[in-house]
């Protein structure tokens, strides 16, 4: 009787063990989290079977990383490290955080590479043309107004040396909004790597980075939008395994006055909003900070120079221009591998 009971107990324990094993070796699932950051939204999808990677926990960690990034470089937050530098009217150097240094260094490198097309000091011009926190201008700024603002714009007025930055004019204003989303995406990618999540897709305000695949080795698919503001429709779908993608375009953020279209992208060489027919630029690179910055730089350059630059740098680039009879695609040689 006693032996019987013991064997029953043994069978029962074995069954319990089996049930435990089955629940632990569950097939990896696709999980998703989302939230708000940098005046926009973020979405993260990832694949895991590890109970440690439950969405509440991952979201908490992602939010903490993004709060950190904002505390360094948000211009919306008057107390961020960057805002304090902008408010400071002295021209003596200040020591900056590693994060801010990393982003500023890259912004200045790409400014030089792009012959000033990317310029993180154009903020006052962005405001002058009505894309800042102030209301739209009643009329187009005069040449004198433009000249006065241009006195305090130019990346050459910003120096980064020995972990310190300084400005040559007290009113210099640095706005990293064209690179910070990409950097935020990269920081979230780093976090997921640290958590040993190997398959993911991260997106902040349209800038993305992905690794691996969905469950069942299904590739991540990215839709590049048609450059029209009235609806969201797909221009092209690309499959990516380990890459970052950013798109810049004037088709969503612009206004028209007297039949002229004003874009939120400023050509630092003229001090005015860009005027050409390049309406969308998509860049695929290995990190999202570069993709984000290059997308803006190429948008400033216009279609011809943008394609030349992409060839010279071997950047994978998809450009869309507005033509009389609709939109036209142009791709760089390095983009060919993403065309299906
Ligand atoms: P979006 O993703 O909205 O297209 P971008 O990443 O291209 O935006 O960045 C656009 C923002 O960058 C503008 O709103 C402005 O603040 C700033 N900006 C505009 N022109 C330039 C420029 N030439 N260099 C750097 N930043 C710029
Ligand atoms: Mg961008």
Image: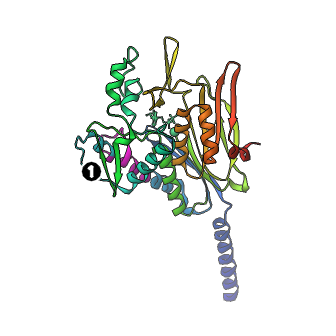
Say if 253 sits above or below 120 in the image. Answer: above
Judging depth in this view, the residue of 96 and 164 nearest the camera is: 164
Badge 1 local density, few (<14 within 10 Å), some, or many (20+)?
A: some
User: How is the structure coloured here?
Assistant: rainbow
Task: Give the residue at x 60% y 47%.
Answer: 313
Is residue 94 in the magenta section? no
Residue 59 x, y percent position in the rendering: 49, 52
Task: Give the residue at x 33% y 21%.
Answer: 145
Residue 221 x, y percent position in the rendering: 68, 45
Instruction: Judge whether residue 132 can be spotted in this image.
Output: no
- Res 320 → quadrant: top right
With 156 as the anchor, is 21 left or right in this view? right
- Res 27 → quadrant: bottom right
**Helix, strand or loop status at disc 1:** loop
Residue interval drawn in magenta: 63-81
Residue 229 x, y percent position in the rendering: 58, 24
Say if 241 sits above or below 336 in the image. Answer: below
Majority secondary structure of magenta residues = helix
Residue 71 x, y percent position in the rendering: 35, 48
Q: Which residue lies furthest to the left in this view?
A: 90
Say if 270 sits above or below 257 in the image. Answer: below
Instruction: Judge whether residue 169 can be spotted in this image.
Output: yes
Task: Give the residue at x 33% y 28%.
Answer: 149
Say if 224 sits above or below 125 in the image. Answer: below
Task: Give the residue at x 38% y 37%.
Answer: 154
Location of mark 1 (residue): 93
Judging depth in this view, the residue of 303 and 47 nearest the camera is: 303
With 143 as the anchor, is 300 left or right in this view? right
């Amino acid at each position: 009787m006693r032996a019987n009971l013991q064997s029953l107990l043994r069978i029962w324990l074995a069954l319990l063990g089996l049930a435990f094993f089955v629940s632990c070796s569950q097939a990896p699932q696709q999980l998703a989290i989302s939230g708000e950051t940098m005046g926009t939204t973020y979405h993260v999808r990832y694949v895991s079977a590890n109970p440690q990677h439950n969405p509440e926990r991952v979201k908490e960690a992602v939010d903490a990383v993004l709060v950190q990034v904002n505390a360094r470089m948000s211009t919306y937050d008057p107390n961020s490290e960057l805002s304090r530098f902008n408010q400071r009217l002295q021209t003596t150097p200040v020591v900056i955080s590693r994060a801010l240094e990393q982003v500023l260094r890259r912004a200045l490198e790409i400014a030089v590479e792009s012959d000033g097309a990317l310029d993180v000091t154009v903020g006052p011009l962005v405001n002058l043309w009505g894309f800042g926190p102030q209301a739209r201008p009643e009329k187009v700024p005069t040449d004198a107004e433009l000249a006065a603002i241009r006195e305090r714009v130019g990346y050459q007025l910003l120096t980064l040396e020995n972990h310190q930055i300084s400005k040559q004019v007290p009113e210099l204003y640095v706005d990293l909004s064209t690179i910070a989303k990409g950097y935020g995406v990269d920081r979230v990618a780093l976090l997921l790597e640290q958590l040993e999540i190997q398959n993911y897709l991260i997106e902040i305000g349209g800038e993305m980075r992905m690794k691996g695949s969905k469950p069942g080795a299904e590739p991540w698919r990215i839709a590049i939008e048609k450059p029209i503001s009235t609806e969201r429709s797909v221009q092209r779908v690309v499959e990516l395994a380990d890459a970052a993608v950013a798109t810049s375009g004037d088709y969503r953020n612009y206004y028209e006055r007297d039949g002229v279209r004003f874009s939120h992208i400023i050509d630092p060489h003229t001090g005015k909003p860009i005027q050409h027919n390049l309406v969308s630029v998509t860049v695929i690179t290995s990190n999202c900070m570069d993709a984000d910055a290059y997308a803006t730089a190429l948008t400033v350059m216009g279609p011809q120079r943008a394609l030349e630059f992409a060839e010279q740098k071997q950047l994978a680039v998809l450009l869309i221009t507005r033509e009389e009879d609709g939109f036209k695609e142009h791709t760089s040689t390095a983009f060919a591998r993403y065309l299906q």
